[in-house]
Amino acid sequence: MKPLVFILLASLAGTAAAAPVLQPKVLATHPHDPTAFTQGLAWAEGWLFESTGLYGESSLRRYRPGGKNGLIKRLPKQLFGEGLAVVEGRLVQLTWRAGLALVYDRHTLRYLDRFRYRGEGWGLAWDGHRLYHSDGSDRILVRDPDTFRTMSLIQVRDGDKPVKRLNELEWVAGELWANVFETSRIVRIDPESGQVKGWIDLAPLRPEETRGDALAVANGIAYDPQGRRLFVTGKRWPVLYELALPEDLEDQHANQSAN
Ligand SMILES: [Ca+2]
């Protein structure tokens, strides 16, 4: 594997309270379906799982990075697919305004069950115990995976400034990461306090082909904990990027391994 290097760029440029901005370190690029309106991305044991949105075009997908022999399941035309999490042997997929979370078998994509919730569905992530659900605001709902009930709320703040429009989510080595809607940034959140630990700017990764498409924003983060790498993409992006873990998280891992 290549050296895992993230470059600290803008920590001196912001206010004292604002968290630093990192540039991503790209390890590899893979093709991504340029018609996929990515709303959720997740990883488990060699497979990527993707939820796509828009009415009449929403889907659930399972594929290898760069691989062609994937599975795709189309959603009913009245459902708009949103955030997606792998919860052990199952997948949980949010919908935007239907108040439905759909549950599937992870291996076959067979529909199994559903939960109902109030409000909108944007992003979803799993930390091994709890689900994290964003709804486009500056709060993240922490949910019980068995009942989908809200257990607590995380208010996300950079210094004292609320961070709104939190979108696709991912649990990354003890941090909660989120795309911020209509920006090219990923925010790294301390799940205990809701404080922003840092930002990652994906603007340099936006493919040239999407420049004329105002909806083609960065969205979709999946973490491979065994490979210690991230996958990121965007809505209708023809490319899926494989990124190195930020250096501070690698250092943390090295320190833990040494103890
Ligand atoms: Ca994700």
Image (cartoon, rainbow, N blue to C red):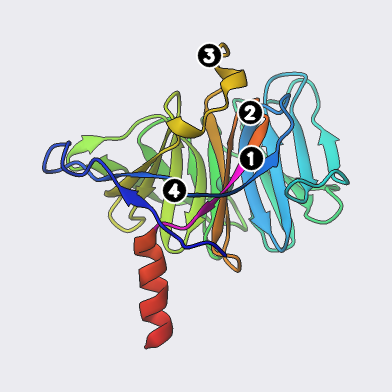
Say whether disc 1 or disc 4 marks the residue closer to the N-terminus. 4
Q: Nearer the viewer, residue 152 or 205?
A: 205
- 94 displayed left or right of 105: left
Q: Label 1 to label 2, Cα distance in Å?
A: 7 Å
Q: Is residue 117 above or below residue 36?
A: below
> Which residue in the structure is indicated by mark 2?
237
Label 3–label 2 contact, CB within 8 A:
no
Q: How dense is the environment of label 4, judged by Cα within 10 Å: few (below 14), some, or many (20 and up)?
A: many
Q: Quadrant of the N terminus?
A: bottom right
Mark 1: amino acid:
Leu
Q: Main secondary structure of the magenta part?
A: strand
The residue beneath circle 3 is 214
The verdict on residue 145 being magenta is: no
As measured in the structure, the alpha-carbon distance from the residue carrying label 4 to the one carrying label 3 is: 23 Å
Closer to viewer: mark 2 or mark 4: 2
Q: CA distance from mark 3 to mark 2?
A: 12 Å
Q: Nearer the viewer, mark 1 or mark 4?
A: 1
Looking at the image, which residue is at 75% across and 20% down? 78
- Determine which residue is flagged by label 1: 240
- The magenta segment is 241-246
Q: Is residue 29 left or right of residue 257?
A: right
Residue identifier under label 4: 177
Three-letter residue code for mark 4: Trp
| Snapshot quadrant of residue 24 | top left
Q: Nearer the viewer, residue 207 or 133?
A: 207
